[in-house]
Amino acid sequence: MDINLDTDIAKLIFSSVFALITFGLWLRRKLSRDSLEIVKDRAEENVIKHLEDERDKLLTENDHIKKRIEKVEAERNEAQQMVSRLSVEVKHLSEKVQELKEITEQLMIKLETATKELHEHAIYFAAHNMSEKRHNAAGIKTIIKEE
């Protein structure tokens, strides 16, 4: 019985050692896989965090761009309104300029007419004055002769 007991103990020890080695290998492989999964998880977390940061950055930039677009649109609308007002004002001023040109032309015609009339009157008065002076001179000569 002793031999059987020794053989049974040897089998038990061999089985226990084999089980421990198998468990050790399995545990090593499991821990290695877990370690790899942990590394993968951390890498994924880092990628996700990086992508979230990029998304937040892009959303912030997008908000700034939207605000700038709104500002530019408001400025453009103001400029369009100003151009429209200035166009109306230019049209109005052009009409006034045309009216003033017409008035100026009418005044130039009246001035030319008045200048001609004044010239004619000046000639008439000059001629009348000369004839009056001749008449006066003749009258003075007559008076002088009589004396």
Image (spheres, rainbow, N blue to C red):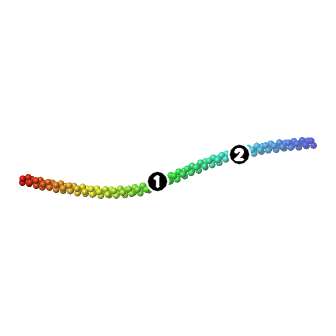
Occupied quadrant, residue 127:
bottom left
User: Image check: 59 left or right of 92?
Assistant: right
User: Image check: 113 left or right of 12?
Assistant: left
Occupied quadrant, residue 89:
bottom left
Occupied quadrant, residue 14:
top right
Give the percent coordinates (x, y) of residue 109.
27, 57
- Frontmost residue, 122 versus 73: 122
Residue type pointed to by label 1: Ala
- Frontmost residue, 106 versus 21: 106
Q: Mark 2 and mark 1: span between their CA atoms?
A: 60 Å
**Residue in view at x 14 percent, y 55 percent:** 132
Give the percent coordinates (x, y) of residue 57.
59, 48
Answer few, some or many: residues within 10 Å of disc 1's Cα (few below 14, many 20 plus, some between 14 and 19).
Answer: few
Residue type pointed to by label 2: Ile
Instruction: Classify the position of the N terminus by image quarter.
Output: top right
Nearer to us of marks 2 and 1 is: 1
Residue named by callout 2: 38
**Residue in view at x 47 percent, y 54 percent:** 78
- Residue at the far right: name it: 1
Residue named by callout 1: 79
Give the percent coordinates (x, y) of residue 81.
46, 55
Give the percent coordinates (x, y) of residue 9.
88, 42
- Frontmost residue, 8 versus 139: 139
Residue 19, numbered circle:
none
Q: Could you tell me which secondary element the residue under label 1 belongs to?
A: helix
Answer few, some or many: residues within 10 Å of disc 2's Cα (few below 14, many 20 plus, some between 14 and 19).
Answer: few
**Residue in view at x 75 percent, y 45 percent:** 30
- Residue at the far front: name it: 147
